[in-house]
Amino acid sequence: MANSKFQPNCGIPIDFEGFLGARWPKDVFYFSDDFIGNNSTASAELGTWLSTLVAQAATGVSVVDGTSGSQDETGGILAITTEATAGDGENLQVNGAAFQIKAGYPLYFETRINLKDVSNSKAFIGLCIPDTAILASAVDDIGFRIASDIWYFLTEHASTEKTTDIGITEADDDWIRLAFFYDGADTVIASVDANDKGEFTEICSRKLSVATDYVPDLIMMTPSIEFTSDATASAEIMWVDYVFCIQQRYHE
């Protein structure tokens, strides 16, 4: 696989020649969920996603038809619904930690999400070690987190983190896309599509060689979602259209 520069206006992992050249699955390992049906379970290692209640008895997870009256998208959409209780929510992690930031193995993660009420939501979406309380206690993770109306790009290693405001104000019930790319060498680049048009803008980067960037390298992680309510006023909802993560399978 030849080296290439990350191009932030892609919306697809164009840096993976094996993927574009139809050599998958030989060259790359690929996880994707467009949420056509509910693949979550409360039992570890059974099903695709391990589902864990956070703090209270959340209403839980369901899959809605993207062409229904409540959404104007096609395909499946994951809906995570909380009770009207602060701290109530749901944790979802793909069973089996299969991804890591490791030299020689480029990686790309992307998701499309929507919050019913941005100001009353807390969430994380990205890669994390197995942890059923990510927002409260995760120690190694990389992805995006919202708190107090602000979306951040987050890298965290051994419980020490670095956050960067991604610079967009998400409106209630508004779709955005979030992505990060590891070049297989020393750099992680985070990008966002605030207009949901598939055109990504680079917002920050991290270096594995910079200790204070706290990139969780050489640690096995898994696609992860956690969503909780930040208020007692009403039940909150996080919709996730898709999650995918792709990584080079072997180091030539």
Image (cartoon, helix red, strand yellow):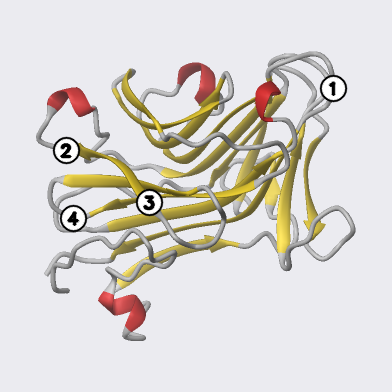
Q: Which mark is residue 201?
A: 3
Query: Viewed as shown, does residue 171 lie left or right of 83?
Result: left
CA distance for labels 2 and 4: 11 Å
Q: Where does label 2 land, which residue? A: 207
Depth check: give the residue in front, 9 or 85: 9
Q: Secondary structure at mark 1?
A: loop
Mark before the other along the chain sequence, 3 or 2: 3
Q: How many marks?
A: 4
- Residue at image location 73% in from the left, 14% down from the top: 86
Depth check: give the residue in front, 215 or 231: 231
Can you tell which quarter of the image residue 14 is in? bottom left
Q: Mark 4: few, some, or many residues within 10 Å (few <14, many ≥20)?
A: some
CA distance for labels 1 and 2: 40 Å
- Residue 23, horizontal then vertical, whole percent: 32, 84
- Residue at image location 37% in from the left, 23% down from the top: 139
When the figure is inspected, residue 157 is found, relative to residue 191, above or below; the finding is above
Q: Where does label 1 land, which residue? A: 234
